[in-house]
């Protein structure tokens, strides 16, 4: 960890949970050092991958810092995925070690024999096929290595083909006591995190923003309050109890808090909040306005991705003058280009590119996807695939989702993966999956099915199709609804015209 993080005040709280579990900086330092020795003794060396399968458990931070101080990559895996999906990520990443929470024992057991994983550790209880995490740490040295090269996250973000792809960065140069990531600088320089800050993290730790932000907050010696899972009223109670100064939400969380009765909302003191960050999905203008009316001008929105290729930011007061904007570049600059790569003038809609100001990324084992994310003429310009425009003052407005990705509750769901599953259903002749407006989640998954001749449609078939998907991929990806149609709009070349389909249902 960075100088002064724990040495000056070893009893300072690095992280805590709502149920009273606490991890001090002295404990985090010692346990991450011990785990670094375990990883080294198991043969892992610079550039190797450690996979983490956990719920929101404080030991996730021990794993994070052990990897960061060992020159390794950390792949945190969504524990809502199916065993087949988790096994794919383990194999594709080439993970040499897998560390799991006993709370996920059935899933962990199902993937225990995957790929080239040699070291398997479980914390929080016994898991078949795994050694004891605590016993391994207890037998390891607590003396830091003299050489502690910087590691990095390598997190997986699904592509439109439905296969997850790891976002891989070159490892930062230097040692762990030197800030190696833009996010570490940004939490301080842009969002004002200091050693005295208290950061509320309500989202799953396997997601890119919660994992990297919590690590960055701890890099400055601040305290993380990690919720086990999001609950609207509990979030308000934790802000009051711990005098939270910084927090990060997705818009769906705002919606759920706004849905609380007025008497409940007004019962909690949120005046300690200095910055309430939101990202991951577009926030409806009305929702954001209500949050500013309630919490004051403390909301700060950023637009970025797991790829960390750039970022725009907008604060509340600026947003009130430009509602709907996601801000101006703090890492960039931003360019908006036509399909042929020509840069467009202000007000013209096109593909949004960030001009790299740091280390470029690549999609692990997918050079074609990496090339497709790059500008045809400027290789240091890359895109997340979003469409938008810049105004005359350089403020970015997004106008469409990338490749019709469904963003439900801040989580990206890729229609092609669901369509590939449903194409195998015996009652389905043709299928399209799109996002439809949802007042709570922002969007929900809807499947439009053209049935085979002679198939009887109705509620029973709808439930059968939903269950068919849930049996094959993660349940959160399954359609919330199935609509039966006579035909689907396709071009003469057979390409599904999802834009027309969305227009028909909007």
Image: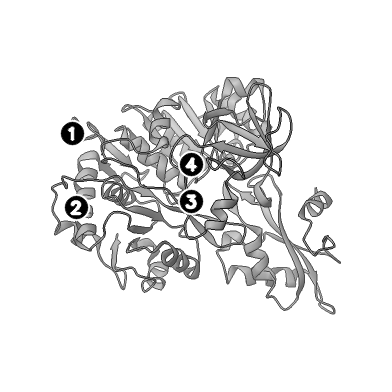
Is 46 situated left or right of 135 in this image? right
Mark 1 or 4, closer to the camera: 4
Q: Which residue is mark 1?
A: 7
| First in residue order: circle 3 vs circle 1 | 1
Question: Taking 456 as reference, is 319 above or below it?
Answer: above
Question: Taking 14 as reference, is 194 above or below it?
Answer: above
Q: Which residue is mark 4?
A: 308
Within 10 Å of disc 3 (Cα), the crowding (few <14, some 14-19, many 20+) is some
Is 81 situated left or right of 390 in this image? left
| First in residue order: circle 2 vs circle 1 | 1
What residue appears at the point 48 percent right and 60 percent down from the top-left corner? 365
| First in residue order: circle 4 vs circle 2 | 2
Q: Nearer the viewer, residue 243 or 161?
A: 161
| Residue 466 in the image, given as x and y percentages of width and height | 66, 67
Mark 4 or 2, closer to the camera: 4
Within 10 Å of disc 2 (Cα), the crowding (few <14, some 14-19, many 20+) is many
Q: Which residue is mark 3?
A: 362
Question: Taking 15 as reference, is 272 above or below it?
Answer: above
Provide the secondary structure element on which disc 2 rests: helix
Within 10 Å of disc 1 (Cα), the crowding (few <14, some 14-19, many 20+) is few
Q: Which residue is mark 2?
A: 34
Q: Are marks 2 and 1 in contact (CB under 8 Å)?
A: no
């Amino acid at each position: 960890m960075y100088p002064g993080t724990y040495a000056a005040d070893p009893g300072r709280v690095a992280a805590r949970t709502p149920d009273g579990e606490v991890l001090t900086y002295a404990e985090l330092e010692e346990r991450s050092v011990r785990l670094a020795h375990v990883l080294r003794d198991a043969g892992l060396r610079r550039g190797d991958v450690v996979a983490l399968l956990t719920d929101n458990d404080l030991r996730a931070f021990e794993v994070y810092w052990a990897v960061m101080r060992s020159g390794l990559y950390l792949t945190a895996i969504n524990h809502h995925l199916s065993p087949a999906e988790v096994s794919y990520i383990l194999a594709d990443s080439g993970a040499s070690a897998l560390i799991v929470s006993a709370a996920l024992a059935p899933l962990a057991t199902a993937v225990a024999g995957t790929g080239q994983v040699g070291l398997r550790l479980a914390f929080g209880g016994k898991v078949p096929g795994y050694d004891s995490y605590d016993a391994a740490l207890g037998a390891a040295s607590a003396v830091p290595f003299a050489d502690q090269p910087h590691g990095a996250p390598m997190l997986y973000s699904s592509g439109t083909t439905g296969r997850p792809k790891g976002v891989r960065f070159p490892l930062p140069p230097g040692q762990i006591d030197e800030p190696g990531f833009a996010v570490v600088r940004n939490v301080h320089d842009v969002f004002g995190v200091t050693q005295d800050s208290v950061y509320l993290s309500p989202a799953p730790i396997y997601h890119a923003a919660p994992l990297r932000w919590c690590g960055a907050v701890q890099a400055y010696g601040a305290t993380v309050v990690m919720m086990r899972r999001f609950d609207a009223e509990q979030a308000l109670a934790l802000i009051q109890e711990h005098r939270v100064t910084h927090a990060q939400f997705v818009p769906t969380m705002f919606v759920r808090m706004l849905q609380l009765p007025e008497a409940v909302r007004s019962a909690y003191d949120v005046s300690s909040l200095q910055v309430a960050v939101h990202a991951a999905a577009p926030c409806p203008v009305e929702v954001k306005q209500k949050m500013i009316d309630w919490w004051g001008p403390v909301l700060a929105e950023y637009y970025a991705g797991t790829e960390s290729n750039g970022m725009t930011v907008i604060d509340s007061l600026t947003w009130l003058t430009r509602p709907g904007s996601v801000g101006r570049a703090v890492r960039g600059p931003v360019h908006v280009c036509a399909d042929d790569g020509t840069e467009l003038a202000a007000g013209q809609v096109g593909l949004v590119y960030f001009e790299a100001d740091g280390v470029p990324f690549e999609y692990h084992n997918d050079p074609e996807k990496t090339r497709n994310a790059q500008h045809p003429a400027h290789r240091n310009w890359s895109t997340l695939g979003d469409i938008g425009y810049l105004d005359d003052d350089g403020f970015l407005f997004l106008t469409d989702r990338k490749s019709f990705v469904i963003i439900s509750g801040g989580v990206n769901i890729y229609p092609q993966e669901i369509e590939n599953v449903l194409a195998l259903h015996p009652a389905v002749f043709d299928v399209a999956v799109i996002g439809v407006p949802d007042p709570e989640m922002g969007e929900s998954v809807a499947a439009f099915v053209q049935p085979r001749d002679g198939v009887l449609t109705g509620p029973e078939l709808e439930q059968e199709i939903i269950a068919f998907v849930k049996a094959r991929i993660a349940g959160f990806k399954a359609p919330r609804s199935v609509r039966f149609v006579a035909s689907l709009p396709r071009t003469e070349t057979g390409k599904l015209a999802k834009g027309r389909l969305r227009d028909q249902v909007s």
